[in-house]
């Protein structure tokens, strides 16, 4: 099976041994995005709403680089260091996605890279 690596300067560069996304056939696997500003590679904001918005912007940039958009996302995994922020995720998701919404999981975790409050990964289907 042919795998195509997806990269864009409009999302943070990988901070480890992974690709921003990998396309296999019509399926694109978007790596976890944290709320880093791609221009500075610094945390986009201290408050969780700003962090969540930056994560969605980063995912959208990678989706565009792969030839799609957030509308093509079929599965979204959300990792939060504080599940009390889950209602904010729901509120903001409604701004970035429309029905039919992607399948989703939200998981509380003890910590995330660079001590951020949120990370999200996605699966997108094109075609």
Image: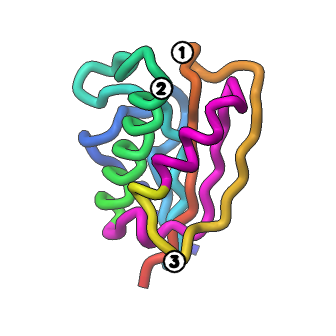
Q: Residues within 10 Å of mark 3 (few under 14, many from 20)?
A: few
Please, is residue 97 above or below residue 15 in the view? below
The residue to which callout 1 is attached is 114
Q: Does the CB distance between marks 1 and 2 fall below 8 Å?
A: yes
> Is residue 76 magenta-colored?
yes
Whether residue 5 is in magenta: the answer is: no
Q: Is residue 3 visible?
A: no
CB of mark 3 within 8 Å of CB of mark 2?
A: no
Q: Which residues are magenta?
A: 67-93
Q: CA distance from mark 1 to mark 3?
A: 33 Å
Residue density around tag 2, few if under 14, some if 14–19, many if 20 or more, within 10 Å: few
Percent across and percent down for residue 67 are 31, 69
How many neighbours does mark 1 have within 10 angstroms: few (below 14), some (14-19), or many (20 or more)? few
> Which residue is painted at 44% across and 78% down in the image?
126
The residue lying at 31 percent from left, 27 percent from top is 37
User: Which residue matches tag 3?
Assistant: 25
Label 1 sits on a secondary structure element that is helix
Q: Residue at x 39, y 38 (%)?
A: 53
* Of residues 23 and 95, the one drawn nearer to the viewer in this rendering: 95
Closer to the camera, 76 or 101?
101
Q: Nearer the viewer, mark 1 or mark 3?
A: 1
Q: Which residue is mark 2?
A: 15
Q: Above or below — where is 41 with respect to 8?
A: above
Give the x, y percent position of residue 35.
43, 29
- At 54% from the left and 77% from the top, the residue drawn is 100
The CA distance from mark 3 to mark 2 is 26 Å
């Amino acid at each position: 099976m042919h795998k195509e690596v997806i990269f864009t300067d409009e999302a943070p560069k990988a901070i480890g041994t992974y690709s921003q996304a990998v396309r296999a056939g019509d399926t694109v696997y978007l790596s976890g995005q944290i709320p880093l500003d791609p221009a500075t590679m610094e945390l986009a904001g201290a408050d969780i709403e700003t962090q969540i918005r930056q994560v969605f912007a980063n995912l959208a940039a990678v989706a565009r680089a792969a030839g799609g958009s957030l509308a093509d996302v079929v599965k979204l995994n959300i990792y939060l260091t504080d599940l009390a922020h889950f209602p904010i995720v729901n509120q903001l998701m409604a701004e970035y996605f429309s029905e039919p919404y992607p399948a989703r999981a939200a998981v509380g975790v003890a910590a995330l890279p660079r001590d951020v409050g949120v990370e999200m990964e996605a699966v997108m289907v094109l075609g």
